[in-house]
Image: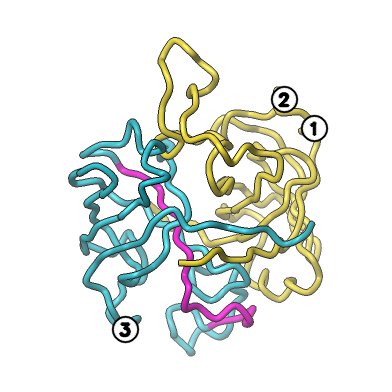
Chain colours: A yellow, B cyan
């Protein structure tokens, strides 16, 4: 299969501006911010509102795509592990996945909590959460 | 943000060959098959083994990328909804997300259950599942 092209649908606005300040993942985050969805994709938000939890995919534009092994959570005592066995941002296709709670919606802007990505991170998809 | 390039890391081998035969999502699927990860990405699998549940991202290469509203599950009685409020394969970046149980591993091939995508679907990422 050939490479494919992914087009960002929006961008994150938040107060996480350094990797050291970013929570390890959404389940450990109480950080809030805004998902700005570009106007041409606004119709795709129909049905999303406050109180819902949504699954959001991000493109980690600053991540290293060339390493296949990492120290999980930077802890060298546990040794190297394959990136596919971790949630590290390091991976061939640096897509991140968060489950975020929608606090409010104003048109194409979703206020959310649970953010674990940097301000300015591109958004590439939003999905309904499947109840476990 | 400009478009980004995603490179498939592997491909699905399974017995789902038509969309009508595909389960609506992984939580409703008992279908098994194999995730073949290409040799150059094999090191990334270190730490993945039988019994684990992994999060897998697929590129739905046959999906329509141009529509922003769909009838959820094809049920017209409930009206159109924005694709980002659904799990429809139709969406600007047709990435699918499944949680799959690893039944066995043989090198770069993972036998899994819970498949809901067609035979031949490209795999673009695998992640550790976060315990809820």
Residue annotated with mark 1: A17
CA neighbours of label 2 inside 10 A, class few (<14), some (14 to 19), many (20+): few
What residue is shown at x 52% (from left), y 69% (from top)?
A: B86
Position of residue B119 measured from the top left corner of the image (x, y, whole percent): 30, 71
Q: Which residues are magenta?
A: B53-70
Q: Nearer the viewer, residue A69 or B78?
A: A69
Residue annotated with mark 3: B20
Q: Mark 3: which secondary structure?
A: helix
Q: Are marks 2 and 1 in contact (CB under 8 Å)?
A: yes
Per the model, the C-alpha gap separating discs 2 and 1 is: 7 Å
- Does residue A5 lie above or below A67 as drawn? below
- Does residue B79 lie above or below A2 as drawn? below
Residue A48 relative to residue B120: left or right: right
Residue A118 relative to residue B66: left or right: right
Residue A116 relative to residue A71: left or right: right
What residue is shown at x 25% (from left), y 46% (from top)?
A: B102
Q: Chain of mark 2?
A: A
Q: Mark 2: which secondary structure?
A: helix
What residue is shown at x 59% (from left), y 53% (from top)?
A: A57
Q: Mark 1: which secondary structure?
A: loop
A76 falls in the magenta region: no
Position of residue B130 measured from the top left corner of the image (x, y, whole percent): 43, 37
Q: Chain of mark 1?
A: A
Q: Which mark is residue A21?
A: 2
CA neighbours of label 3 inside 10 A, class few (<14), some (14 to 19), many (20+): few
Q: Nearer the viewer, residue B73 or A96?
A: A96
Position of residue B126 measured from the top left corner of the image (x, y, whole percent): 42, 47
Q: Are marks 1 and 3 in contact (CB under 8 Å)?
A: no
Outermost residue to the front: B40
Per the model, the C-alpha gap separating discs 2 and 3 is: 46 Å
């Amino acid at each position: 299969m050939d490479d494919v092209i992914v087009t960002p649908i929006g961008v994150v606005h938040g107060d996480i501006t350094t990797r050291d300040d970013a929570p390890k993942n959404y389940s450990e985050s109480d950080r809030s911010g805004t998902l700005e969805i570009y106007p041409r994709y606004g119709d795709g938000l129909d049905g999303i509102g406050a109180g819902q939890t949504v699954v959001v995919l991000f493109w980690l534009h600053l991540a290293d795509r060339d390493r296949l092994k990492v120290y999980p959570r930077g802890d060298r005592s546990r040794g190297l592990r394959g990136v596919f066995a971790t949630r590290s941002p390091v991976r061939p296709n640096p897509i991140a996945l968060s489950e975020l709670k929608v606090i409010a919606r104003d048109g194409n802007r979703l206020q959310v909590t649970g953010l674990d990505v940097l301000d300015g991170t591109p958004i590439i998809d939003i999905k309904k959460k499947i109840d476990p």
